[in-house]
Each structure stands twice: as C-alpha cells, then as structure tokens.
Image: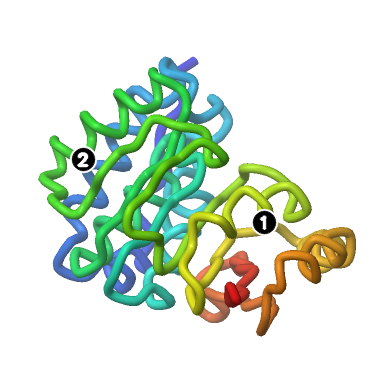
Amino acid sequence: MEMSVEAEPAAAGTLFGARIDRARQFTADLASRGEELGLVGPLEIPRLWTRHILNCALLAPLLKPGRVGDIGSGAGLPGLVLAIARPDVQFILIEPMERRVDWLQRESAALELDNVEVVRARAEEAKLSPWLDQATARAVSALSKLIPLTVPLVRSGGELLFLKGASVEAEIEAASPVIRRTRLADVEVLTLGGGLMAEVTRVFRATVD
C-alpha cells in the first residue's frame, strides 16, 4: 500500500517564505523517489514535512553567509533544505555514495539551486579549499565520531551545527574527551521550533578553535 505525504503544515510557509514552492517540489520528489533510491524508509513518507523537511529548515536562521558544509548529506537533509531556505549561503554537500551523489546533483539542478556544490567523498577524505565557515550534519553518527571528522574541514572561529535527538546531552558527555582534544569552545545545545512545531529540534553548536 502506497503511503501518502501529510498535508503541508502551516509552519512551512513561515520557514520558507517566498521559496516555499521549491520546498514543496523537493518534498514531492523525495516522496516519489526517496524509498526507491534508499534515501528514506517507507514509514517516513507520511511524515516527511514535520519529521524531516521542517526539522531541517529550523536550522536556517543559525547560518551565516559563507561556506557551509553538510557532512553525509544523503537525501539532502539538511543540505538541500537549507539551500532552499538560504540562497545567500553557499553549500558544499559531502556524500560518499554514488547513488546519493547523483540524487543531490539532479535535485539541485531541478530546483535551480545555484548555491550548491556536491562533493563525492567521505568526510575524512574531503579536500576543501577554502575551509568551511560552518558545518552541519544530521543522523550521521555519534558526536564522538562526528566531531573528529568535521573539525579539520572548518576554519578557526567557524561553527559546528549538528541536528541531534533527545539523547544529545548524553552524546556530549560521551564525547567530552574528543571535545577537549579538538579544543571546541562555546559548546551548547539549542532547542528550536518551540511554539511552531509539535516536536522541538535540538542542535549541538560549538565553535572551532
């Protein structure tokens, strides 16, 4: 039985503004091809807007004009969503799997996103010049593994902005040796979407020394 996407939440218009049509197109494309391409599971289709698209879009106001890398971009969550919401930011989507790279390239072209570059590489093998101003990631790995992969790609004074689940505080505790070793500063957890969404979004934020 084919699963249908939930109705577009009112918050979508608030978060995407004049770019809402591109967000609608991306959501429709992900609903029609995402399961087939192994980008999202079948149970995720009915909640694409709330659990995935808007969850990612909440991060957009935290971005600054510059170069933002999305580590393990996969389906484009959050990379393509953020590229739609923030046309003033240049996004580098880093993804090792060829099938997902093809998807990211096709979608960025179809959505006419001229602020997207797709790099096929594992994070630890990516050669970026210049360095990133900020880096994002969602559902890639625990902080203890993700931080060492990402810090070398970000300039001094740049930021890590990782979308995380309810166990983020426990992840921070487990990653405390890595946080000290990589000399991250201003480590905090931000809670976004309160009053706008039924479920809040948690973001791990830290500054790279």
The mark closer to the camera, 2 or 1, is 1
28 w.r.t. 10: above or below: above
Image-based side of 173 in relation to 99, left or right: right
Residue found 62% across the figure and 74% down from its top: 206
Location of residue 132 in the rendering, given as x and y in whole percent from the top left corner: 40, 61
Report helix, strand or loop for mark 1.
helix
Residue found 28% across the figure and 36% down from its top: 28
For disc 2, the marked residue is 108
Please name the amino acid that badge 2 sits on. Ser
Report helix, strand or loop for mark 2.
helix
Instruction: Give me the disc on residue 147.
Output: 1
Which residue is at the front of the view, 131 or 196?
131
Location of residue 64 in the rendering, given as x and y in whole percent from the top left corner: 34, 76
Quadrant of the image occupied by residue 54: bottom left
Image-based side of 25 in relation to 204, left or right: left
Sooner in the amino-acid sequence: mark 2 or mark 1: 2
Please name the amino acid that badge 1 sits on. Ile
How would you rate the neighbour count of disc 2 (Cα within 10 Å): few for under 14, some for 14-19, many for 20 or more? many
Image-based side of 105 in relation to 191, left or right: left
Location of residue 86 in the rendering, given as x and y in whole percent from the top left corner: 26, 66
Q: From mark 2 to mark 1, how far is it between C-alphas?
A: 27 Å
